[in-house]
Image (spheres, helix red, strand yellow):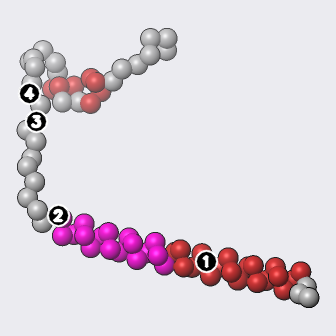
Amino acid sequence: MQTSQSRTWRLIWLTAISAMICWLASVMMLRALAQTAETNEAEPTERRAPPPKLSDEESLEYRDSADNNISLPVDI
């Protein structure tokens, strides 16, 4: 019959080895993903045109700002 201490250490080692296997699999997956991402960067992509300017009344600092698209609740 095994003592509870030897079972505990066996469980600790099993957990540590399992964690290392998962970590290695994650690293291998990320390296493979990084290699495929490098090859995809060489493909030409179309650039989107900037949004049209609607009016000249807005000041230059707010014309292309993302702040003019913000919506806030009424009861602030």
State which quadrant residue 68 falls in. Answer: top left
Amino acid type, mark 4: Pro
Q: What element does badge 4 sit on?
A: loop
Q: CA distance from mark 2 to mark 1?
A: 35 Å
- Give the number of the mark in front: 3 or 1: 1
Labels 2 and 3: the sequence-earlier one: 2
In the picture of the structure, the residue carrying the numbered disc 4 is: 52
Q: Residue at x 12, y 31 (%)?
A: 51
Mark 2–mark 4 CB contact (< 8 Å): no
> Which residue is at 33% across, 24% downward?
70
Q: CA distance from mark 2 to mark 4?
A: 28 Å
Q: Looking at the picture, does residue 65 appear above or below residue 43?
A: above
Q: Quadrant of the N terminus?
A: bottom right
Q: Is residue 46 above or below residue 54?
A: below
Residue numbers of the magenta segment: 24-41
Q: Left of 74 or right of it: where is 50?
A: left
The residue wearing badge 1 is 18
Left or right, 76 with reference to 10: left
Report the residue marked by disc 2: 41
Q: Secondary structure at mark 1?
A: helix
